[in-house]
Image: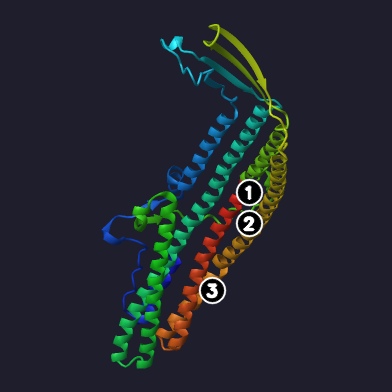
Amino acid sequence: MTSLLCCCQLAAGAAAGPGLPALAAASVASEVPGGRSELLLSFAEAERRWRERSRELRLAEAAVSGAEADLRSADRAPNPQASLNLASISPQEGFGAGSLRDKRMDSILRVEQVFERGGKRELRRQAADAMLQAVRDDRDDVARQQLQALTSAYYGLLFAQEAEGIAADTAALYRRSVATSELRHRAGDISGADLSRLRVEQQRVENDARQAQAASMRARVALAYLIGEEGNAARLVASDGWPAPGEGADAGSADPAQRADVRAALARLEAAGKARDLARSLKTRDLSLGLQFERNQQNLPGNSFGVGVSAPLFVNHEYEGEIARAEADLQMARESLGQTRAQAQGEIEQAAADLAASRERRLRLEGGLLADAERVLRAAEFAYARGASSLLELLDARRTWQQVQLEAANARADHARALAAWRAASAQ
């Protein structure tokens, strides 16, 4: 911003003519609506608030809690079943007289327990454990993506602030230029046509400044959502500077197998394999063992015990549908893993290429174009103040200077976003 302020002061002084004071630079976001103070945020502070308040992270943590509950449910044997039956009740004589113990009926108390065979419980536990790992990896992947979104939003606000400052400086410069030119027009130094052109240009830059303010507010709202500061969106100010141009210069290849989304897909493949094995184990019959106690009151009162075993009869089906479905789910998990690996590899390579390109663009702008545009503007202001060039040439130089400034700010923002994308793509 130092070169911008110097140039604005030079431009205002040249337009005003010799001896007139230069324009003081406009500050960026010095006051927010309602007179409330700014809320300055470093990136580290924004990340801290994001980790504490992110809705997406809380949803991911809730999903992990649900998967942990599923694991507890899967690693349990079936509960026993208890039943009480009354039998041998005569439709003619009914229950008979006397107390409950003397009624003419038999009572049977039975307890049954299903014993699973074929390793069903262990397979359920293994499948649920693999799904728990997948959900945990999903949580890490959500954090990876949301951190990239936070970084983009933070530097998006920083760019919006810089663009707002450039637009505000330019608008202030033109307001001062128009005021000075009106005096010069009355003195006969410039024509009415030149004054009208300046006024038209002033309205254009005023519109640009208003749009920059709206864009800055949109950037604040986007960042406020991510860090849970919706009520303070208008107060947010990104206080950090841009990442150094050298950051990410050594970006190389990364192993996609270590990314959270690839790990999640691999865990889902393992869970699908266990689910397939569980479906196949349904063909192994479970046995139900029953123990009963019977009190006989019909003929000779007495107590007796009994035991029984039951097993399903595979008469109508042998779980062919369940097995076929599990096989299809396993194949889908294999394909999903291959797709996720390919996408991760592509994202890593694309992010590295984008980072290299954005870094080179930023270095070209900061290393040469900005200085060239500033020299052109200085020369145009100097020449116009002495009547050696036309107003159109001055306006063209000013537009070029503003455009190059915005392009340089955009290049810094692109580099910051590309750096965040590469770090997210190669995150372990």
What's the colour scheme?
A: rainbow
Dot 2 crowding, Cα within 10 Å, few <14, some 14–19, many 20+? many
The Cα atoms of the two marked residues, 1 and 2, are separated by 9 Å
Q: Secondary structure at mark 2?
A: helix
Residue type marked 2: Ala
* Dots 3, 2 in contact, CB < 8 A: no
* Dots 1, 2 in contact, CB < 8 A: yes
Question: Which residue reaches farthest front?
Answer: 92
- Front-most of residues 63 and 243: 63
Q: Is residue 205 above or below residue 337?
A: below
* Mark nearer the N terminus (3 vs 2): 2
Identify the residue shown where x is 29% and y is 61%: 33
Where's residue 41, x and y in %? Answer: 40, 51
Where's residue 135, x and y in %? Answer: 58, 40
Picture quadrant of residue 23: bottom left
Identify the residue shown where x is 58% and y is 14%: 292
Judging by the rendered image, the residue that carries numbered circle 2 is 351
Quadrant position of the C terminus in the picture: top right
Judging by the rendered image, the residue that carries numbered circle 1 is 426
The Cα atoms of the two marked residues, 3 and 2, are separated by 31 Å
* Mark nearer the N terminus (1 vs 3): 3
- Front-most of residues 128 and 186: 128
Where's residue 170, x and y in %? Answer: 40, 74
Dot 1 crowding, Cα within 10 Å, few <14, some 14–19, many 20+? many
- Residue 255 visible, this orientation: no
Residue type marked 1: Ser
Judging by the rendered image, the residue that carries numbered circle 3 is 372
